[in-house]
Image (spheres, rainbow, N blue to C red):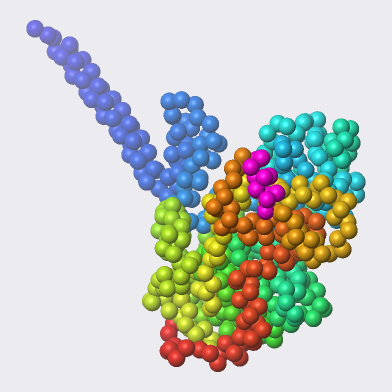
Amino acid sequence: MASKKTIGWVIIIVLLTLVAGFILGNYFSSKTLGRRLFLSSGNKINVILDVIDEEYVDSVNMKDLVEEAIPKLISELDPHSAYIPADKLKAANEDLEGHFGGIGVGFVVQDDTIMVVSVVSGGPSEQAGIQAGDRLVTIGDSLFAGVGIKTEQIISTLRGATGSKIKLGIKRNNSDKIIHYEIIRGEIPDKTVETAYEISKGIGYIKVKKFARTTYDEFVQALAQLMDAGCQSFILDLRSNTGGILEVSINMANEFLSRGQLIVYRQGRASPRNDAIANGAGTCQENQITLLMDEISASASEVMAGAIQDNDRGLIIGRRSYGKGLVQNPITFSDGSALRLTIARYYTPSGRCIQRNYQLGKSDAYEQEWIDRFSHGESFSKDSIKQDESLKYKTAAGRTVYGGGGIMPDIFVPRDTSGITSYYINLENNDIFYRYAFKYVDQRRKQMKQFKNYESLYSYLKKQPILEEVVRFADANGIRPRTNLIHVSAQLIENRTIAYIVGNAFGNESLYAVVMKDDPVVLKAVDVIKKGEAKPEFIRKNIPADTTQTK
């Protein structure tokens, strides 16, 4: 029988064990509860990343993990918020700057060789002596001919910081001798006003491809040149213009509006309403203006179109625009990456937001809805476009316009598909027109000098067997002839090829002058202006009977 002393020790040991168990259990319980409460806080993502970094079974590259996670996080927001990694931010910003560091050449890759198509006037390459028609064989110490090089790699190699040096090896006039150049990269303008010329007596045509920092200055200069040439009415072509810097489109719209007229306003949950109002300093407040739009015209393009339409200032001609009414704020991080976060919506003067419907995190469905427009036939028939009657608004003079889904044109012009066949599309997708045009001019550079202007070259080309030659060139490049389809597309193939030849020889303005000869949207705009139908007083006098004021 155990002694009282032994029993006493047993009791003490049991009590100590219970106390220790209670303390340890309480400790681990409190640690678990503390972790659970901490993970419930608003900064859960940082906590999860810390836990993975400290406790995950294998080592993880946390930087790569974060870079993979951020785009997925942002994708749960609206379709236009975006994360831009550091290695892509420079290119993204350059697109909106209107200039970049480079050597100043245009080129085409033909027969696995980089062919210089054009040289920027006054640029580094022209100053060094490089000419159109030169073959670029080496860049630095690397061979860039006959190696299946991609255009994107050529561009990234030729571009660089202004003031930096680059070595080029050039072949000229089919000579085997390589001429070596060392070129100091300069600031190369990326012209956003692609062309501006008098398209018909007294009517100026201006093509704007995007809204970059330099676009307003380019636009004002184009207006001044056209007015000096006698133009009093204008066609502003914003087709395929996906937008850019909002303030630039506001400044451009200001050129056509009277003092006090609302251009656009922005408003968001954390962004109070901000109005942009015309200051009355515009140079074209009395001139006729038409804007050309299509399914790709978006964002800043739609801001300008909305300002012109809602103030009954001019006419929108073409097809319904894309429908982007969200404003992004750029936020740059210390590692060189950036977030473009949607912070507001913009509204046209009538109060409508033209942003298409979307659901958070459903970007694929959002893009599919835009694609479905084509299958529903809205590019070919105005009647196939369904407007939301709950989003009906009125312009200043009482014309009915709609919010949501883009800007509906005042004059609808269907997409012209006459002559477009699978054979034509195949030629276009393989750059046959551009490549053939370069080859044509390159083989006749001395002959080209006899043509004093693009009109004389155009007249000459119209008498040449261009169609047959393009078909043979395409066949040699793997696109076999299809007689029936060639017959259907014959005029389109010939006209497009001649336009590229003229453009290669005389520049962009000449190319557009040829292309626009048969463009139905442009022809409609010219007709409207000649009849005086783009004048504000005419627009106001021809308002449909339904002028009930709504929103």
The vertical placement of 44 against 221, above or below, is: above
Considering the image in quadrants, where does the N terminus appear? top left
284 relative position to 313: left or right: right
Q: At 51% from the left edge and 40% from the top edge, which residue is drawn? A: 68
368 drawn magenta: no
Q: Position of residue 41 (x, y in %)?
A: 40, 48
What residue is drawn where x is 53% and y is 90%? 542
Q: Is residue 397 above or below residue 86?
A: below
Q: Quadrant of residue 24?
A: top left
Residue 471 shown in magenta: yes
Q: Residue furthest left?
A: 1
Extent of the magenta region = 467-477
Residue 122 makes an appearance in the image? yes
Where residue 446 appears, as percent x and y from the top left, is 88, 51
Q: Is residue 99 visible?
A: no
Left or right: residue 532 versus residue 123 is left
Name which residue lies at 50% across and 45% down. Answer: 70
Indicate whether 476 appears above or below 449: above
- The image shows residue 316, relative to residue 5, as above or below, that is below
Quarter of the image with the C terminus is: bottom left
Q: Nearer the viewer, residue 510 or 299?
A: 510
Which sits in the foreground, 238 or 267?
238
| Residue 279 coordinates in the image, percent (x, y) | 68, 81
**Camera-side residue of 218 and 435:** 435
Q: Is residue 385 left or right of residue 534?
A: left
The answer to which image quadrant residue 212 occupies is bottom right
**Magenta: predominant secondary structure element?**
helix
Give coordinates of residue 469: x percent, y percent.
70, 49
Q: Which residue corresponds to the image point at 80% horizontal and 30% vertical from the top-left?
A: 141
Q: How many marks?
A: 0
Question: 341 or 322, which is in the foreground?
Answer: 322
